[in-house]
């Protein structure tokens, strides 16, 4: 059965349009997913010709002459380059010619284009990237925001938690299906008195939401443990968490290689372990689900690929994007957000500050009494 059409920005990656086109076209044919390749028409048609392909009902081409680079300011570029490939990709979706967007490269530009062209869901101030982090014999952890927003206010963290809960409930494979995902805020301690004012304010509201399985705070060392299914933080912290994990994996394997070279027995052991190590990376760290991450909160589905994505990432990314679209996940998130009472949330914040103010006043009065 033919799936809904996806618009793919093939220009934003580090390795050129041909890599994006090859991976996307292969996935389109293997999974029967109609696509619109958005970018420089001449480049796209040339690559298709080299692949022995041409535009068809399965593979369409949309010309977009401009590209937004990693160095450009997203908001300025989106306004100044109205024919940028990522902006045109969202316009294709808004026109009804496609049902979702997939793009690599400048994440800020993708988010800015999505907001400018398609808008956000009710109550969403800023969308969030929801990344999957694999765990041993457990369902993947959903971490959001993992890079879209450098800093966030309390309401944004609240909406991230709600969106993450919905996504987690449908994103897992059948063996890991979660009806009520455990949601936690990332903080510097498990006690609710820890964290910033923003985190404590979000916790106060989430703890009162009966249809959300909010379990409180989780520390950085608890992310990989079976404590929570969804971990919420601002994009600055989330991106640092992901990059630190990537760096730690490289460090451990570099350390392992250096250590085994000190003995013949160690080198032989590493040689025997190579198939297992490769299997771990292939099955856990390079799964199709990890090839892309959804940008939750836009009115239309959007998937983010890393700028250094190669053919396999586009191949698996298109499948994940299509699954997201076919699963109507955006509509499910919209329903969850409609139940949020932001006025009540504001009152909770006011009450929280009133309680803090009263406590401070009592302390000051007691101090004055002590001093006579």
Image (spheres, rainbow, N blue to C red):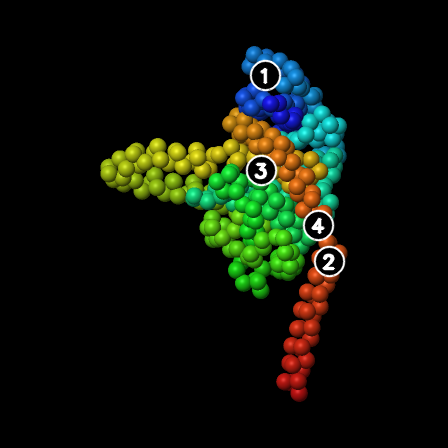
- Under circle 4, the secondary element is loop
Indicate the position of residue 118 as horizontal and vertical percent values.
73, 35
Crowd band around label 1 with a 10 angstrom C-alpha radius: few (<14), some (14–19), many (20+): some
Residue 352 point in image, percent of width and height:
68, 65
The disc placed on residue 344 is: 2
Which numbered tag is attached to residue 293?
Answer: 3
Residue 201, image x, y percentages: 65, 59
Q: Is residue 270 above or below residue 354?
A: above
**Is any part of residue 88 visible from this angle?**
no
Q: How many marks?
A: 4
CA distance separating discs 1 and 2: 55 Å
Q: Find the distance from the CA under tag 3 to the CA under tag 4.
A: 25 Å
Cα separation, mark 3 vs mark 2, equals 31 Å
Q: Secondary structure at mark 1?
A: helix
In the rendered view, would you say 299 is above or below 238? above
Describe the element under mark 3 as helix, strand or loop.
strand
């Amino acid at each position: 059965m033919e799936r809904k059409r996806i618009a793919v920005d093939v220009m934003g990656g580090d390795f050129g349009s041909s890599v994006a086109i090859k991976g996307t076209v292969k996935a389109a044919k293997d999974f029967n997913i109609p696509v619109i390749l958005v970018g420089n028409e001449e480049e796209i048609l040339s690559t298709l010709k080299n692949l022995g392909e041409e535009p068809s009902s399965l593979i369409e081409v949309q010309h977009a002459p401009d590209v937004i680079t990693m160095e450009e300011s997203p908001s300025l570029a989106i306004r100044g380059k109205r024919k940028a490939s990522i902006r045109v990709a969202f316009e294709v979706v808004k026109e009804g010619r496609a049902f979702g967007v997939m793009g690599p490269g400048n994440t800020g530009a993708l988010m800015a284009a999505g907001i400018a062209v398609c808008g956000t869901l009710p109550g969403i101030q800023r969308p969030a990237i929801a990344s999957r982090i694999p765990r041993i014999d457990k369902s993947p952890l959903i971490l959001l925001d993992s890079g879209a927003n450098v800093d966030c206010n309390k309401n944004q963290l609240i909406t991230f938690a709600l969106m993450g809960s919905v996504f987690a409930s449908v994103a897992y494979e059948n063996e890991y299906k979660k009806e009520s995902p455990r949601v936690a805020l990332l903080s510097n301690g498990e006690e609710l008195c820890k964290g910033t004012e923003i985190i404590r304010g979000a916790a106060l509201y989430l703890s009162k939401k009966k249809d959300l399985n909010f379990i409180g705070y989780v520390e950085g060392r608890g992310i990989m443990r079976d404590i929570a299914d969804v971990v919420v933080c601002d994009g600055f912290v989330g991106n640092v968490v992901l990059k630190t994990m990537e760096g730690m994996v490289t460090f451990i394997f570099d350390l392992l290689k250096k250590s085994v070279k000190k003995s013949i027995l160690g080198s032989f052991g590493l040689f025997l372990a190579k198939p297992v190590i490769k299997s771990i990376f292939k099955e856990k760290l390079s799964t199709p689900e990890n090839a892309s991450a959804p940008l939750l909160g836009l009115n239309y589905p959007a998937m983010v690929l890393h700028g250094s994505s190669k053919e396999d990432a586009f191949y698996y990314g298109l499948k994940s994007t299509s699954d997201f679209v076919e699963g109507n996940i955006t509509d499910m998130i919209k329903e969850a957000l409609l139940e949020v009472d932001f006025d009540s949330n504001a009152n909770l914040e006011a009450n929280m500050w009133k309680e803090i103010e009263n406590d401070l006043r009592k302390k000051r009065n007691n101090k004055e009494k002590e001093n006579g």
